[in-house]
Amino acid sequence: MFWWLPTILCAMALGAHFLRAQQTVITLLFLLAPFLLLVRRPWALRSLQAALLVGAFEWLRTTAVMVQERVLFNEPWLRMVLIMGGVTLATMVSAWGLTGRRPALWFRLREPGTDEQ
């Protein structure tokens, strides 16, 4: 029903992440990315998927940096890894969720009434 909601939430989380890092241009790109949902063309779908996958790799990179810092200062890191792993997984699942039947129809990757097996 709301197949687009995870995409919007993940893009907002990535925008907040880059805002905290004071990366204004990247922040704006992620905050504007959900508007590609209004562009019913295949390139918009692929752009959203690519942005979410790049975002997932950014979460992995950030996790690695944070683990290094916590180990260096002898602080606990396991809970942080589990949380960041969940965020990374949610972002990847959001990109994968855009491969379903409803997004394919919305972005005109297939015609209505055709069910490919």
Image (cartoon, grey):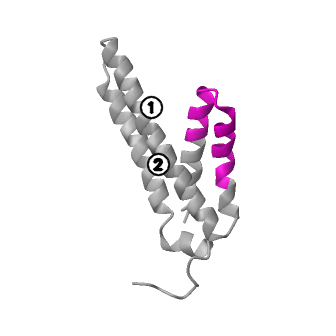
Q: Which residues are magenta?
A: 13-34
Residue 105, how many percent across, how many down?
58, 76
Decide which of 68, 104 is in the foreground and name it.
Answer: 68
9 in magenta: no
Q: For this view, does 38 lie left or right of residue 82?
A: right
Q: Is residue 76 left or right of residue 32?
A: left
Which element carries disc 1, helix, strand or loop? Answer: helix
Q: Quadrant of the C terminus?
A: bottom left
Please tell me which residue is depicted at 34% across the width and 32% down the height of the picture. 81
Give the number of marks.
Answer: 2
Name the spot of residue 109 as percent of width and height, x first.
Answer: 57, 76
At label 1, which amino acid type do we have? Thr
Regarding residue 78, the answer to whether it shows in the image is yes
Tag 2: amino acid: Thr
Instruction: Provide residue 42's location: percent of width, then percent of height.
Output: 61, 70
Q: 9 above or below 49?
A: above
Is residue 35 left or right of 8 when viewed as pictured?
Answer: right
Classify mark 2: helix, strand or loop: helix
Which residue was labeled with disc 1?
A: 62
Q: CA distance from mark 2 to mark 1?
A: 14 Å
**Helix, strand or loop for the magenta stretch, by majority:** helix
Q: Nearer the viewer, residue 40 or 25?
A: 25
Residues under numbered marks 2 and 1 in contact, where contact means CB atoms less than 8 Å apart? no
Image-based side of 60 in relation to 79, left or right: right
Can you say which quadrant of the picture contains the N terminus?
A: bottom right
Q: Is residue 63 above or below residue 30?
A: above
Residue 18 placement (x, y as % from top left): 59, 33
Is residue 32 one of those drawn in magenta? yes
Residue ID for mark 2: 91
Q: Residue at x 37, y 30 (%)?
A: 64
